[in-house]
Amino acid sequence: MAGRLDQAQKAVVRLRKLNPTLRVSNLKNVLGPYRRAEDISRYEEGLRRAGLPK
């Protein structure tokens, strides 16, 4: 979202090594209940653009 797609893609690769089952669809399970819906939507969009599977 900040225009640093290369860094974001590398971060998603590292993230997937730590949690191979992580997907955009189950991201809410990892974040917990203390996030605003609009924050989660923006986070999901950024991770989707960086290559996190749906």
Image: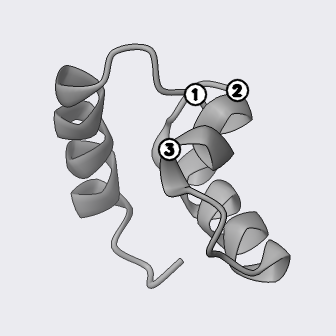
Foreground disc of the pair 2, 3? 3
- Identified by mark 1, the residue type is Arg
Q: Is residue 5 left or right of residue 47?
A: left
Considering only vertical position in the picture, is 42 above or below 16? below
* Location of residue 1 by image quarter: bottom right
Considering only vertical position in the picture, is 20 above or below 34? above
Question: In the orientation shown, which residue stands out farthest toward the top?
Answer: 21
Of residues 26 and 9, the one drawn nearer to the viewer in this rendering: 26
- Residue 52 percent across, percent down from the top left: 51, 34
Q: In the rendered view of the protein, which quadrant contains the C terminus?
A: top right
Residue density around tag 2, few if under 14, some if 14–19, many if 20 or more, within 10 Å: few
Q: In what element is the residue under mark 3?
A: helix
Q: In what element is the residue under mark 2?
A: loop
- Residue 40 percent across, percent down from the top left: 70, 67
Residue density around tag 1, few if under 14, some if 14–19, many if 20 or more, within 10 Å: some
Q: Which residue is mark 3?
A: 30
Q: Which residue is mark 1?
A: 23
- Residue at 32 percent of width and 46 percent of height: 9
Foreground disc of the pair 1, 3? 3
Q: Which residue is mark 2?
A: 54
Of residues 20 and 29, the one drawn nearer to the viewer in this rendering: 29
* Location of residue 13 by image quarter: top left
Q: Earlier in the sequence, mark 2 or mark 3?
A: 3
Distance CA(mark 1)–CA(mark 2):
5 Å
- Residue at 69 percent of width and 59 percent of height: 45
